[in-house]
Amino acid sequence: MPQNGRVSDEAYHRLYLPKNEQRAPYVAILHRVAIALSVVLLNWLIVLLESDGYRDAVDGDVSVVDALYYTTVTLTTTGYGDITPVTTTARLINALVVTPMRLLFVLVLVGTTIQVLTQRSRDDFKIARWRSQVKDHIVVCGYGTKGRSAVRALLERGHSREEIVVVDQDMNAVSDATAAGFFAVHGSTTSDEVLREAVVDKARTVIVAVNRDDTAALTTLTVRQLARNVKVVAAIREQENNDLVRQSGADSVITSSDAAGRLLGLATDVPRTVHVIEDLMTAGHGLDIEEREVSPDEAGKSLASLGVPVLAVVRDGKLLHYNEPEVAELRTGDVIVYVASLDAGT
């Protein structure tokens, strides 16, 4: 079901631990089931081999089906008494072999139940501890192509996996996120309860990377209602929805269709420019865009004195281009946006 508003919010939601923090009991349960089946088959074989030593209260003979029936009621300690061992050998086998197998079968069943309950309790404890400690994290709403690219960029810039929480209503996406080592919440990104599960009110940034522009607007609005001071960055498909998403509370809005179209146009006439842009968009090597606050020693100086290519200056929340007269002299509190050469260490 598409995320098309609050009416489509899922009634059920849950925070999932990263796979590397889960001990998912299902593999152990399968092992226990295999052991239980092996015990049943072995016990059945023993009864079949010694079937002459047993008597059926109905017709006296113990068939293959009767042996399986006797095995199941014996191992489960039901014991109706309609089939009984009558010879000394059969009774000894029951006392020395079948009884230990019966105890093993019960232990396997009880142990499986205890393990499931213990594992769930352990996971609930970890989730409660995470909720009490988490803050200044990054919530990524939508783990599709855009969301995964955003997460990859965050990791390339040095953010840890523990800082990132993924929210998606597609369970396959949630499974992919937990397999990649992230906490994840299963549910609609437009739901108050789902976003509370991601502790959005303590987040540093929320990245809205859902597939539809209307869902992006609703998600942004929901986030802003729950956390007025969190930074919200949203991606949309069409430029005509830019104002709508900004009015919903987004601090930054990125239009994917415009960005792609701009690059396609540049690639036609100035392909080398596109290579530079691609380099800037690839973190970890070559050129990269960085920002930092002007130090007290740099106040009063010009942009040229900084020794790096400055693209813009942010002053009192306003973006000023490098060639505007206001930035001819730097001030304390200014933030410069510049091009860094990572290969050169600057």
Image: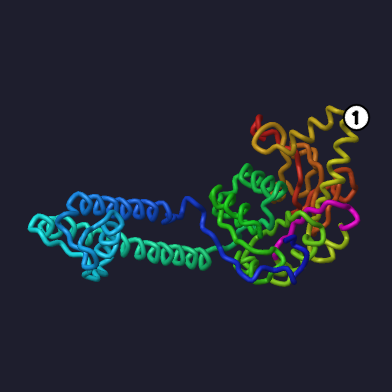
First to last magenta residue range:
230-241
| Residue 50 screen position, x and y as percent | 17, 52
Q: Amino acid at mark 1?
A: Thr
Residue at 67% across, 47% down: 148
User: Viewed as shown, does residue 129 lie left or right of 97?
Assistant: right
Q: Nearest the camera: 298 or 256? A: 256
Residue most extreme to the front: 59
Q: Secondary structure at mark 1?
A: helix
Whether residue 225 is situated above or below residue 296 in the rendered picture: below
| Residue 245 screen position, x and y as percent | 83, 61
Circle 1 residue: 268
Q: Can you see residue 231?
A: yes
| Residue 147 screen position, x and y as percent | 69, 50
Residue at 51% across, 68% down: 132
Q: Nearest the camera: 292 or 135? A: 135
Residue at 54% across, 49% down: 179
- What quarter of the picture does the N terminus occupy? bottom right
User: Viewed as shown, does residue 44 lie left or right of 308?
Assistant: left
Residue at 65% across, 30% down: 343
Tell me the crowding category of disc 1: few under 14, some 14 to 19, or many 20 or more residues within 10 angstroms, Cα based: few
- The quarter holding residue 139 reads bottom right
| Residue 13 screen position, x and y as percent | 60, 67
